[in-house]
Image (tube, grey):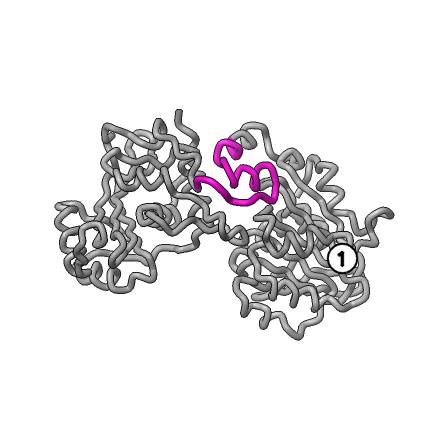
Amino acid sequence: MIYKKFSNRQTELMFWWCRPDTRNFDAIICDGAVRSGKTMSMTIGFVLWSVENFSNSDFALCGRTVESLKRNIIEPMKTWLEGIVTIRQRRNFLEIPAKNGVNRYYFFGGHDNSSYKIIQGATFAGVMLDEVTLMPESFVNQAIARCSISGSRIWFNCNPDSPTHWFYKSWILQANEKNALCLKFSMNDNPALDEDIKKRYKRLYSGIFYERYIMGRWSVAEGLVYDMFDKKINIIHKTPETVGDYYVSSDYGIQNATVFLLWRKEKSLKRWLCLDEWYYSGRENRRQKTVSELVREFKAWLGDIEPATIYIDPSATALITECRHNGFTVKPAKNDVLEGIVKVSSMLASGELIFSDKCTHTIEEFAGYSWDTSRPETDTPLKINDHCMDAVRYFANSRPKYAYITRFA
């Protein structure tokens, strides 16, 4: 790959290990805004450092999962380092020639508290941890402990999270004690990002996500979760012509509400439109309905509409079974709360997600869906009147993927 230009910050990240003023650090921590070029720069720097200083040595490349690591690092690496080094990919590791031999770079995923076991017992000359804030502390500590070879270095890369996050407290705040170099990135540190793209990303986020992903700050989640929800943009009072398959997302409750949301693409602008909602609360109606009753009434509500897929909370096994028994195609929804909230936020901000004014409970919940400030150590919404919000999140996390939609005025 031919590079036209690197920013000063990118160059500093790639070559800190050989500069007189920074080469004695044991670790580097790179955090900041999204799309700031930090992942590419760190990957290039990590490989250049390793082939320059070691031969016939082992290294660890770590992501939240091996799949995300391959998507974010391994596959792009071949382009980023084209013409610089030769990369041979095996099933679970890379081979890259060094001065007097070949180095091996093993893949690891740190997705839960048991993940440390897969890296236990290995010995590495260096480790790179991409999206380190998404990994459990036990896995990260084990990866660090594996770097026992003389001259080994630890490379951290992440977007900011809460200031109560273990990584912020253990590494960012203790960088001096741990002899770690901290580099903060902004979108201006990526010369490949033009001004229109920067403006697009700034429009896509607001509130806590703007603070973290655009400003690169470690900020506490507080206030409304969807403070970007705009009734002038995200609510329509006249149903436009729609096209394509219908989809449904659902959240199930026994005494709590059961919700079904009906979705379809708007024909002209290709936005996702929530056409209507079916909502029943056993607590509010003082009568709990069986799963069979709920699905029978939902089916009658649909009439002639045949949804291509219904996305349901994966823990609602009784509802999934009953819907399938009634002939519906059902997929357990992807239930990553924060990832889903980020997707809903960006779709709201871009105008890609709109709601008919028939969706009264959903619109009402948007106005009160708030972060739980009693638990600052986690980004957790209050579990109050959130049934429609869960159904919206299931759809955003699981929907068929379409091309990027720009903001609509």
**Between residues 87 and 304, which one lies in front from this camera angle?**
304
Residue at 63% x, 55% y: name it. Answer: 167
Q: Quadrant of residue 193?
A: top right
Q: Residue at x 22, y 50 (%)?
A: 284
Q: Position of residue 76 (x, y in %)?
A: 59, 49
Indicate yes or no whether the magenta region holds residue 207. yes
Q: Is residue 402 above or below residue 194?
A: below
Place of residue 307 in the rendered image (x, y in percent of width and height, measured from the top left)? 22, 48
- The percent coordinates of residue 390 (x first, y second) are 35, 49
Q: Is residue 366 visible?
A: yes
Q: Which residue is mark 1?
A: 178
Camera sees residue 400: no
Residue type, label 1: Lys
- Label 1 Cα neighbours within 10 Å, binned few <14 / some 14-19 / many ≥20: some
Closer to the camera in the image, 305 or 165:
165
The x, y position of residue 278, in whole percent, is 21, 46
Image-quadrant location for residue 358 = top left
Specify the quadrant that holds the N terminus: top right
Stretch in magenta? 200-224
Task: Name the image quarter holding the C terminus.
Answer: top left
Residue 192 sits above or below residue 316 on the image: above
